[in-house]
Amino acid sequence: MKNLMCAEAKQIDLVDYLASLGHQPEKIRNQDYWYLSPLRDEKTPSFKVNRQLNVWYDHGTGKGGNLVDFGTLYFNCSVANLLQRLSQNRPAPAFSFHPPTTLGSQHPAPASFAGEKKDTPDSKIVILDARPLKEQSLLDYLQKRCIPVEIACRFCKEVDFLLYGKKRTVIGFQNNAGGYELRNENFKGSSSPKDITLQIGKHSEGLAVFEGFFSFLSFQTINRSKEAPLPDCLVLNSLSFFERSRPIMEEYNQVHLILDRDTAGISSTRKALEWNTGKQDKYLDRSEFYKGHKDLNDWFIHHRQSQRESQRIAKRL
């Protein structure tokens, strides 16, 4: 059987292809199909396929592209091996195909990464206002995540933004470039520009590195009664900034890695431990502390719930 050409493979419908691999969307909004990432472990869908453009974007890793880009990552194989695999799967399952989308003559839809970089006014997040946290639904959400209001108010704001013509109110965590990570119980996103958040306290020889800001807030909560100053903190806001942040990490004597315990987070931690060559114990894996949980906040929620259950049992006894 003749192998598919690369151009043909890129036209296979991504939604159909993911279904053939056993991945179904968690939610669908117009042309946007949201999945639990097939490339890593997660509980909140952050892997998006724009079916019209036939491209994907993984918010957790900052990677995206066409079907070939996805397939080589998914199977950890070469393009040639992927094309052979796809050819063997025809005609069952029978994939539907997209006509080539062109912008000019030779440029396929620039993997605008599932539409994440579209500049149409309605689809772009526009920040309207930022103020101290007070909206009750957001305070209730913080309580579910076991983050005290006083801790959240030190580092976060209540943010109004506009998306698809609809106004939303969320918890906003600002990055160094002025953009925000945006969260409430029903929304997870970010405004441009996307960047890291570096929290520098009193002069510190140590740096704690987090993937997301709820793990950072959990760290601040767990250590709030400590008299000794905490290390400086780097919140990546996306693992795509991890290697790019190495020059910052290299400025510290010790770097405490408190990344997520999914495939991508563990891989990044291992990569940093390899940087220890000649610099014994500069990079330290602290994720064993919350082993068995997705991240520090997931562990903290479980820990607090266990504490409450123990107190209830003690009262009954």
Image (tube, rainbow, N blue to C red):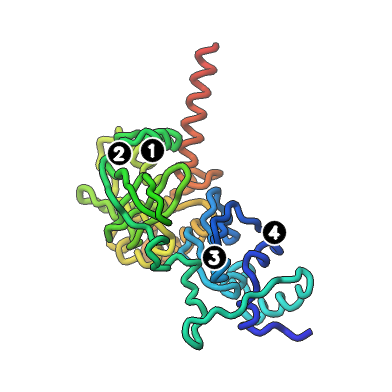
Position in image of residue 296 (x %, y %) = 45, 44
Query: Image point 71% across, 71% down: which residue?
Result: 95
Task: Determine the secondary structure under disc 2.
Answer: loop
Residue hosting label 2: 133
Tell which circle, 4 or 2, labels the residue nearer the N-terminal end.
Answer: 4
Which residue is labeled 4 in the image? Answer: 22
Q: Earlier along the polypeptide chain: callout 1 or callout 4?
A: 4
Amino acid of disc 4: Gly
Q: Is residue 29 above or below residue 312?
A: below
Q: What separation in Å lies between label 1 and label 2 (alpha carbons)? A: 8 Å
Horizontally, residue 41 falls left or right of residue 260, namely: right
Is residue 253 visible in the rendered image? The answer is no
How far separated are the C-alphas under marks 3 and 1? 29 Å
Residue at the image position 63 percent from the left and 64 percent from the top? 15
Q: Amino acid at mark 2?
A: Leu
Residue assigned mark 1: 138
In the rendered structure, find residue 50 and report the number of the disc placed on it.
3
